[in-house]
Image: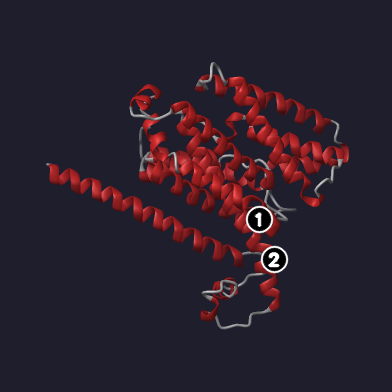
Amino acid sequence: MKENQDRSIEDRKSNWKLIVIGLVLALIFTIFLSSGIGPVWIPLSEVGGIILDRIPLLSRLVSGPFPEVSETIVMNLRLPRIITGALVGAALGVAGAAVQGIFRNPMAEPYTVGVSSGAALGAVVVIFFGFTIAGTYTLQIVSFLFALGTILTVYRIAKVDGKIPVGILLLSGIAISLFLQAIVSTFMYMAGEELQRMVFWIMGGLWGRNWTHVQMILPPILLGIFGIFSFSKDLDAMLLGEESAQHLGVKVERTKKYLLILASVITAAAVAVSGVIGFVGLIIPHIMRILIGPRHRVLFPASAFGGAIFLVWADNLARMLPTVGEIPVGIITALAGAPFFIYLLRKKKYSY
């Protein structure tokens, strides 16, 4: 029997590795293929050559030159938007997994503690008053700062005698979110001609994103994800209950504090450049738990790659649908995610 148990554990480890490797390869394929999708179709081989030609160690494998129009479309228009979408999806996926672990609630998501409402308020303030303090990137910077300010406010309200009760944290986040949403609605009511711009930002989208946006969010998102990953074992222990985790040597309050801050930072960075894109931080951790189980050491990277893939393909659909103008990707994530999630739940039952 012991041999069978050992074999079962090894099989599960192999499955985890295969799934994560498969997600990495799927993300790379998604980025290359998506760079060719659009009103002007560019063959995958040509896209691969254009991208690899920019990588010093791989450029010698590429035989160019390539059409200048194709290079401009791939490198200046599509690829920065795709990379931005992948980073946003990864951030929301990891933040969702972390927040669900903190609350021990599968229905929690990164926006539960008010990050999205704070970012939305920052955005509508910039649009309403026409601020241009940091040029064209004022909206993203102010949204990020408002989002961080919101989570700090929620944290201070929820803190009781040096501790952060999960229930009070949840209720504080909901209360602050509702309050900020009321302020946002007030600005929208008085917006006039700027109302459409506010609505489009709140719906979430990746249009017009460039390499500067990638540079803005890459450091906080990558550092935040690695920081969250470092708490994987502590979060696994906390799933057994806070008292049990303390007996195992976990500093529960410190862990909750750091995880909450890190999850909020990467969510704020994502929302600042994409607007409020819902459902990614809720559905992706669920799907990954179904595939690989609840261990956060594997769940976090899987949620990162899964979120990136999901959002990039949602954005591909948003820019390819035959509609007047481009559909906000936030609409696509909700429409595509809900039925798929219901299908998975019916196909395979699982417990947290």
Q: At which x and y percent is residue 178?
A: 68, 24
The image quadrant where one finds the C terminus is: top left
Image coloring type: secondary structure
The image quadrant where one finds the N terminus is: top left
Above/below status of 143 relative to 55: above
Question: The residue under label 2 is which amino acid type?
Answer: Asn
Give the residue at mark 1.
215
Residue closer to the observer: 252 or 325: 252
Above/below status of 49 relative to 86: below
Q: Residue at x 46, y 38 (%)?
A: 342
Above/below status of 30 relative to 268: below
Observer able to see residue 210: no
Quarter of the image where one finds residue 236: top left
Spot the residue most to the top.
Answer: 161
- Disc 2 is placed on an element classified as helix
Give neighbour class at mark 1: few <14, some 14-19, many 20+ (Cα, 10 Å): few
Mark number displayed over residue 264: none
Spot the residue most to the left.
Answer: 1
Q: At which x and y percent is residue 139?
A: 76, 44
Question: The residue under label 1 is which amino acid type?
Answer: Gln
Observer able to see residue 127: yes
Above/below status of 298 relative to 74: above
Q: At which x and y percent is residue 48?
A: 55, 72
Q: At which x and y percent is residue 21?
A: 40, 57
Q: Nearer the viewer, mark 1 or mark 2?
A: 1
Q: CA distance from mark 1 to mark 2?
A: 14 Å
Q: Residue at x 18, y 43 (%)?
A: 5
Give the residue at mark 2.
76
Q: Residue at x 86, y 42 (%)?
A: 130
